[in-house]
């Protein structure tokens, strides 16, 4: 199967969908059972949403659905009707980058970089919700994202750095 | 200005962190088609017929091609699960997939062979003729000196020094054991992807390949084209490799090239995860028969190594590397006077094997380190002391070469790693459900390709742009290891400028600059870095001359530092102001070469905790010391070492592509374990040892490959310590460990 | 959705319970309810399922959320693991333990408790704790509602009592008392992986004696398996480590694991015994408040 191919071909089930994507209202006509990931790449050129597996393991396709980190290969695009999707491209506005993105660079958490957008998307949700950040907790939060280059050590360093920038200990989730 | 030896941030981190980096799989060509393949579900079969009729009726399908009609050396047999039967090109990926499902292929199963020992015998089914030449790199004639090795011989090497029989007879301890490593896959997250385009009779391929020029030659031979008819371009951002992106793959470039030729349009072919497992590079499953003698004092008297590597069905020149590293690397690490070696790589109908971080060395050191450790423990000797008693040192000349060792940080690695390990490891012995153990592993691995015929050489171009920026054109490909950053640091150091204004580029495919290899074999810093250093020194001289001319003083009165031109009279002005807009552009080329392959060394210590209720093994502490010569960017060196630890842990404890008569049982990331942060050691520390290799730039030698081989044996030796059992067929399952702790 | 947009029968996201039940009553053969979709997408990709219609129930407000009333916890079918983790406290030890070892953060954000119960795969971690807590499953169709104990609702391997036209609405169980403690312990080859064996227990104590005990195991049979012989051996006895150790020796009579990629049957028996011992100890310590 083509890595960014749909699970079913054919055009008899096409459906019009509208949703908010990286701050813009968009619409598309598409097979609703097609993985969200492939629609984001093919129809909206969101190539920061990466393709690594089709089994929900690697996490390189992680985006936010209504502010929750999800794996976009495991979501049929029909599910996003009327909802809000944020990819790595919509994480910040203008030239600003998120403190976690900056921390990834400073901590040497990026080698080939293919996993990085997925880690950032999982991590931004985690850092927003976590009331305590320590190394064990970070490891647990990141087990759905695979990195083949770094051995994760410097990725965890980046999370500590980012948490430190914003005060380290966070308020409990509300 | 001191730029080298400091952890300068990677030049591409913002691009990658924002999702804006463009990898090969993100590229689109105007008017592009999508390729898709029908792959074999049988390990060996004759393709009797392929019917594309129905596939071609699918709306949006442009062409379909059976195996026989593919460009290149394809015949009417499929040789492994995942081998190509037919291919289509279509307007969208979905349509291409649909068309593949509509292809009908009639296959007649052929007898297949999966055990490499069986494959060697006279009555085996012949997968390929002996010493088959498909224009793969490093092909050479062989003379086989073993009556048991008759068929399916890909490559064959022997070596002999001294008298092993005699040495073993005199030894107090002799042990013989077989070690087999798992068939592991690097699992690059970005799967292989290639865009093929023809401009008249020239094939242009765009893909992340570590060895573009070698790939061009290989493919020209395989496809029957002249060398100048193939150009391989590297995408804006190269994908990770770990070796697996060094060479072309039979079902990638030739198939994309055929589809593009048939349609006259660009064709993008992107492997799915199963193809990544079944049609790219897995580490050679290799069988090591190790026989070694030891004196009472733990001195190695002699070593006999028999090596059988499962190459899979196609020759790609990598079996040669496995056998060569298995042959020579023991002598780079230990002083061994009596040595016998025989190695053979074997064609089978298993999945193709290829390059993966520490080709041959990773397998070898697992076997050798396990064996020495076992002998020490059986003899009641300290495993650390036994290694120390046999390690090579500066000035020692291994038997296979005339070149004495120029730099060797083994002793310092051992001392500092042990010290740090003792501080970090748990001394808590009170948990009754946990058994702890510790182990050590060692490695020596070469830097660069100086051993290749004609040595290793490279050229670079370096330019001072009117904008005041420095552009470097070099052969390095930054797969993420950070070569662009390191080469920029070197230039900045020499030029006395800020590294921010240096950009490192992959030179154009048609460049006149010489370099046959690209980024492989841990050569980027050692040989390309040396060329950049030489080029920057030449450029600095040219800049000083131009500045002196502009200011109107003698060149001896001008220096460049901190991005400024300073004169002996005390005048100080920005470099770009003096020479920035001057014509012609100031530029130079430079080269570096080496006939040497200085070893980098590693000593790793591991502590494991075995849960006696389940056999679960947790790597609690890991200390990796590595002699890197000189660390130009220490944090990036650590990153290489830490990444190696992950790959070594998978090898020792988790991962294997499981085959049943050649058919993979877990060729996906749901079932093949790629480990998460939770399987990494609770505590990891890198110790960087700098032995100052005189032939390397600033004393540096290779990093990425040498850090890998010692990891798995350190862990397996720790499990031996904890459980009393020696595991010789990793990955070690929890069940096997559970049985060991119950006994 | 505006009126000129093309809708499709292939994917429907109703917004009320009534609408959902109407759809189910009239749905074509091959229609499939989708909640988080985390398993469904994989099944479809592997060709194990090819639904003609997907009815996405996550837009139905009444099906989501956790209510705690009169000593009963009621969890809506589309409540995600993440919502359970953030809402339930340590009192629900086994449920929390289980939720934390399921897959990963992203999957827990979408994966639902109702999806797991309806799938009825004995390897799913959340089920054994629900057996221990004596959970009930409420299902309904357009006409009536049924409340079924979970061990009757789940009838076999991936087989439930859910009928055509019925929707799994809620899962409920009693809030544990302060004398009760529960735990879930799992072995997997890697973190977040499928259970080799999972074991849940819920215990209440009176003085130093075990007053009640429920033990249930995942991944050792066609359904979740209650370890009644272990329960019988310990109820009424002092909850000492020795007694727990003796009691789990009986576990082999209750379970029937098969050899697979996770290990041999005999290994799984050993792990089940050892982890059940560990699990009961943890539940006991929670019951007496020592952790």
Image (cartoon, rainbow, N blue to C red):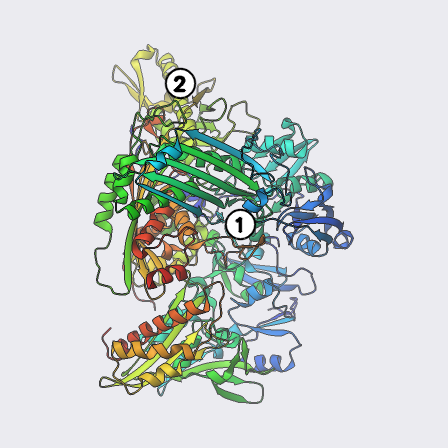
Specify whether residue A10 is in view: yes
> Could you say whether the residue bearing mark 1 is in a helix, strand or loop?
loop
Task: State the residue in front, B223 or A139.
Answer: B223
Report which quarter residue C47 is drawn in.
bottom right
Specify whether residue B316 is in view: no
Residue B388 in the image, given as x and y percentages of width and height? 27, 37
Q: Residue at x 40, y 38 (%)?
A: B704
Q: Please state, as top left, top right, bottom left or bottom right, where the C terminus of chain C lies in the image.
A: bottom left
Q: What numbered label is drawn on residue A115?
A: none
Instruction: Verify CB contact (< 8 Å) between mark 2 and mark 1.
Output: no
Give the side of residue B475 with respect to residue B33, left or right: left
Task: State the residue in front, B413 or A153.
Answer: B413
Q: Which residue is mark 2?
A: B538
Chain of the residue under label 2: B
Chain of the residue under label 1: A
Pointer 1: residues within 10 angstroms few (<14), some, or many (20+)?
many
Q: Is residue B631 above or below residue C139?
A: above
Residue C207 in the image, given as x and y percentages of width and height? 22, 86
Q: Which residue is mark 1?
A: A47
Report which quarter residue A127 is drawn in.
bottom left
Residue extending farthest bottom: C144
Residue B252 in the image, given as x and y percentages of width and height? 61, 43
Q: Is residue C245 above or below residue B529?
A: below
Q: Is residue C221 above or below residue B298?
A: below
């Amino acid at each position: 199967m083509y890595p960014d191919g749909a699970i079913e071909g054919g055009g008899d089930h096409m459906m019009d969908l509208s949703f908010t994507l990286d701050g813009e209202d968009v619409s598309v006509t598409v097979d609703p059972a097609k993985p969200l990931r492939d629609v984001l790449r093919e129809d909206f050129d969101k190539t920061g949403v990466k393709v690594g597996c089709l089994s929900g393991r690697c996490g390189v396709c992680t985006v936010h659905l209504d502010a929750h980190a999800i794996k976009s290969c495991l979501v049929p695009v029909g599910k996003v009707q009327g909802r809000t999707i944020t990819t790595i491209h919509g994480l910040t506005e203008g030239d600003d980058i998120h403190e976690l993105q900056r921390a990834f660079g400073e901590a040497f958490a990026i080698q080939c970089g293919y996993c990085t957008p997925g880690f950032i998307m999982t991590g931004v949700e985690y850092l927003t919700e976590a009331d305590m950040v320590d190394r064990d907790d970070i490891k647990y939060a990141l087990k759905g994202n695979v990195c083949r280059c770094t051995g994760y050590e410097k990725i965890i360093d980046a999370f500590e750095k980012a948490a430190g920038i914003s005060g380290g200990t966070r308020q409990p989730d509300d | 200005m001191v730029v080298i030896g400091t952890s300068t941030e990677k030049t591409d981190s913002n691009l990658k962190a924002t999702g804006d980096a463009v990898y090969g799989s993100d590229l689109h060509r105007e008017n592009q088609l999508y390729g898709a393949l029908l792959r074999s579900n049988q390990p060996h079969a004759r393709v009797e017929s392929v019917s594309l009729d129905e596939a071609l009726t699918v709306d949006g399908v442009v062409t379909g091609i059976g195996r026989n009609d593919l460009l290149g050396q394809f015949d009417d047999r499929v040789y492994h699960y995942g081998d190509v039967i037919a291919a289509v090109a279509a307007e969208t990926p979905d349509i291409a997939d649909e068309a593949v499902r509509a292809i009908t292929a009639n296959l007649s199963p052929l007898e297949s062979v999966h055990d490499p020992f069986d494959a060697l015998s006279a009555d085996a089914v012949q997968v390929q003729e002996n010493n088959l030449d498909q224009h793969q790199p490093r092909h050479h004639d062989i003379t086989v000196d073993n009556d048991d090795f008759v068929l399916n011989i890909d490559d064959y090497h022997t070596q002999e020094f001294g008298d092993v029989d005699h040495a073993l007879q005199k030894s107090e301890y002799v042990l013989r054991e077989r070690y087999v490593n798992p068939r592991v896959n690097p699992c690059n997250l970005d799967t292989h992807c290639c865009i093929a385009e023809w401009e008249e009779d020239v094939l242009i391929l765009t893909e992340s390949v570590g060895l573009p020029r070698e790939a061009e030659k290989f493919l020209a031979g395989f496809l029957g084209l002249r060398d100048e008819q193939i150009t391989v371009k590297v995408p804006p951002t190269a994908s990770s490799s770990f070796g697996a992106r060094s060479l072309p793959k039979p079902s990638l470039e030739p198939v994309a090239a055929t589809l593009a030729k048939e349609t006259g349009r660009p064709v993008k072919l992107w492997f799915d995860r199963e193809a990544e497992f079944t049609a790219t590079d897995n580490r050679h499953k290799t069988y090591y028969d190790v026989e070694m003698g030891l004196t009472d004092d733990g001195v190695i008297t002699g070593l006999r190594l028999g090596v059988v590597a499962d190459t899979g069905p196609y020759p790609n020149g990598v079996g040669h590397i496995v056998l060569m590293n298995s042959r020579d690397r023991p002598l780079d690490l230990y002083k061994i006077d009596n040595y016998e070696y025989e190695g053979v790589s074997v064609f089978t109908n298993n999945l193709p094997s290829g390059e993966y971080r520490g080709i041959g060395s990773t397998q070898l050191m697992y076997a050798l380190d396990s064996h020495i450790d076992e002998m020490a423990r059986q003899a009641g000797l300290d495993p650390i002391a036994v290694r120390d008693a046999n390690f090579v040192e500066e000035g020692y000349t291994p038997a296979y070469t005339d070149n004495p060792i120029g730099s060797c940080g083994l002793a310092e690695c051992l001392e500092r790693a042990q010290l740090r390990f003792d501080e970090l490891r748990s001394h808590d012995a009170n948990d009754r459900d946990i058994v702890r153990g510790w182990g050590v592993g060692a490695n020596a691995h070469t830097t660069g390709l100086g051993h290749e015929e004609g040595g290793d050489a490279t050229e670079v171009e370096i330019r001072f742009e009117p904008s005041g920026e420095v552009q470097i054109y070099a052969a390095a490909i930054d797969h993420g290891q950070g070569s662009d950053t390191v080469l920029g640091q070197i230039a900045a150091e020499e030029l006395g400028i800020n590294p921010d204004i240096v950009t490192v580029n992959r030179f154009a495919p048609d460049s006149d600059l010489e370099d046959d290899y690209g980024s492989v074999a841990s050569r980027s810093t050692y040989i390309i870095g040396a060329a950049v250093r030489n080029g920057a020194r030449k450029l600095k001289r040219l800049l000083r001359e131009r500045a002196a001319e502009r200011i109107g003083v003698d060149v001896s009165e001008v220096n460049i530092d901190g991005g400024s031109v300073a004169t002996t009279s005390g005048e100080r002005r920005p470099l770009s102001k003096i020479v920035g807009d001057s014509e012609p552009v100031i530029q130079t080329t430079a080269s570096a070469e080496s006939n040497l392959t200085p070893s980098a060394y590693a000593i790793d210590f591991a502590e494991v905790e075995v849960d006696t209720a389940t056999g679960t093994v947790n790597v609690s502490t890991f200390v990796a010391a590595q002699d890197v010569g000189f660390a130009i960017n220490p944090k990036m060196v650590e990153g290489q070492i830490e990444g190696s630890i992950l790959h070594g842990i998978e090898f020792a404890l988790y991962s294997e592509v499981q085959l049943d008569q050649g058919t993979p049982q877990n060729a996906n990331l749901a079932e093949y374990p790629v480990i998460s942060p939770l399987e990494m050691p609770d505590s990891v520390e890198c110790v960087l040892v700098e032995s100052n290799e005189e032939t390397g730039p600033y004393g540096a030698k290779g990093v990425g490959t040498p850090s890998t081989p010692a990891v798995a044996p350190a862990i397996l030796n720790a499990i031996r310590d904890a459980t009393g059992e020696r595991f010789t067929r990793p990955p070690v399952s929890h069940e096997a460990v559970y049985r060991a702790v119950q006994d | 959705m505006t009126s000129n947009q093309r809708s499709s029968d292939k994917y429907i996201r109703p917004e009320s319970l009534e609408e959902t039940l109407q759809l189910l009553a009239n749905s074509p053969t091959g229609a499939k309810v989708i909640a988080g979709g985390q398993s469904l997408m994989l099944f479809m990709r592997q060709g194990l399922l090819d639904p003609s219609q997907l009815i996405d129930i996550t837009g139905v407000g009444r099906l989501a959320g956790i209510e705690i009333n009169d000593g009963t916890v009621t969890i809506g079918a589309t409540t995600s693991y993440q919502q359970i983790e953030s809402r339930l406290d340590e009192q629900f030890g086994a449920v929390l333990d289980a939720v934390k070892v399921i897959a990963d953060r992203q999957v827990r954000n979408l994966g639902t408790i109702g999806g797991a119960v309806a799938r009825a795969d004995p390897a799913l971690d959340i089920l054994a704790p629900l057996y221990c807590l004596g959970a009930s499953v409420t299902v309904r169709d357009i006409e009536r509602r049924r409340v079924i104990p979970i061990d009757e609702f789940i009838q076999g391997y991936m087989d439930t009592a859910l009928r055509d036209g019925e929707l799994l609405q809620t899962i409920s169980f009693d809030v544990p008392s302060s004398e009760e403690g529960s735990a879930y312990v799992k072995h997997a080859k890697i973190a977040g992986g499928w259970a080799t064996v999972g074991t849940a227990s819920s215990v209440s104590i009176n003085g130093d004696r075990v007053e009640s005990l429920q033990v249930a195991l995942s991944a050792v049979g066609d359904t979740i398996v209650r370890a009644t012989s272990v329960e019988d051996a310990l109820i009424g006895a002092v909850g000492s480590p020795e007694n727990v150790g003796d009691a789990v020796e009986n576990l082999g009579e209750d379970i029937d694991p098969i050899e697979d990629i996770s290990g041999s049957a005999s290994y799984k028996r050993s792990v089940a015994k050892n982890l059940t011992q560990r699990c009961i100890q943890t539940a006991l310590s929670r019951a007496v408040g020592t952790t």
